[in-house]
Image (tube, grey):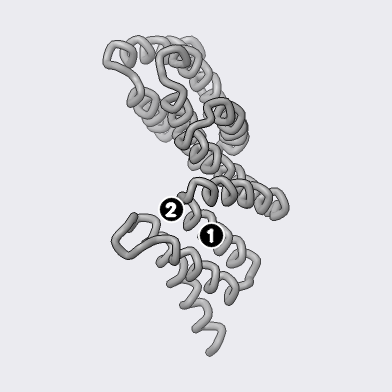
Amino acid sequence: MSAQLENHYVELKAIIGSYCSTSEHSYLNLILDNEFNRTKTLTFSEFKKLIDVSIKYLRQKLTGNQLLNLLRETADFMFIHGEKGVSFEIYNKLIKHGKKQKTKISSNIIADSYLGLANIWAREANWKNTNTNLKKAKAIFSKSNNREGLALTENFLGTILAEKGEVEKARKQFEYALTFITKTKNNIVRNKIRNNLGIICTMLEKYSE
């Protein structure tokens, strides 16, 4: 296993471990390490096997919302590291299980999962499926009045417009996304949108020269 892959393996175990008690984490680490020692040639595509082992063990030990949060973190992790197929499958599982929970938390997790799916489709330049999932996320965020979620969704639409070369429309979209975040709330999201807006404004200045 490469050094980079080994680091990812350790990161994944840390994510899973954050949802466990000390004893559960130790036991689960033993299971995971035994799985790795058995294969000796673990590749990133085999991480799904480790995820399945972990979820199967923790399914009866976590609350419904805890399990959904663990799945979401795992899906995001796999997507960031290039495993779109695995993350796609997990996001869809999240939507299916989240609908059974019927809580405000599970609703937001479902919306986040639609954003995750939109991100995957956007990487494939499949704008139809991207927009379909964004609309689903936006509908859920609107119903729960989740302004941070709405800001992220509108920001995402801005990035799509920018990728398509519709720079002026992207600028207006990012400005609209900012209206959902107050100056004193959630600086991370606000700064993310302002950064995108800054890039677009710089592009517009170059185009006008």
Task: Give the residue at mark 1.
Answer: 154
In screen coordinates, is 140 left or right of 68?
A: right
Q: Percent from the top left, x then y, of residue 56? A: 50, 14
Q: Secondary structure at mark 2?
A: helix
Q: Residue at x 61, y 29 (%)?
A: 96
Residue 137 visible somewhere in the drawing: yes
Query: Residue reaching furthest bottom?
Result: 209
Of 26 and 94, nearer the camera is 94
Indicate whether 70 appears above or below 34.
below
Counting every numbered tag in the picture gives 2
Type of amino acid under label 1: Glu
Q: Position of residue 30 (x, y in %)?
A: 37, 10
- Quadrant in which residue 11 is drawn: top left
Looking at the image, which residue is at 44% across and 65% down?
A: 178
Q: Secondary structure at mark 1?
A: helix
Neighbours of disc 2 within 10 Å: few (<14), some (14-19), many (20+): some
Residue 123 visible from this viewpoint: no
Q: Nearer the viewer, residue 120 or 43?
A: 120
Q: Is mark 2 in CB contact (under 8 Å) with mark 1?
A: no
> For the residue marked with disc 2, what is the amino acid?
Glu
The alpha-carbon separation of the residues under discs 2 and 1 comes to 10 Å
Which circle's residue, 2 or 1, is located before the other in the chain?
2
Q: Residue at x 69, y 55 (%)?
A: 127
Vertical order, 36 against 15 (above or below): above
- Residue at 58 percent across and 60 percent down: it is 157
The N terminus sits in image quarter: top left
In this view, the residue in front, 61 or 84, is 61
**Which labelled disc corresponds to residue 148?**
2
Residue 90, x across and y down, in percent: 57, 30
> With 187 as the anchor, is 161 left or right in this view?
right
Residue 13, quarter of the rendered image:
top left
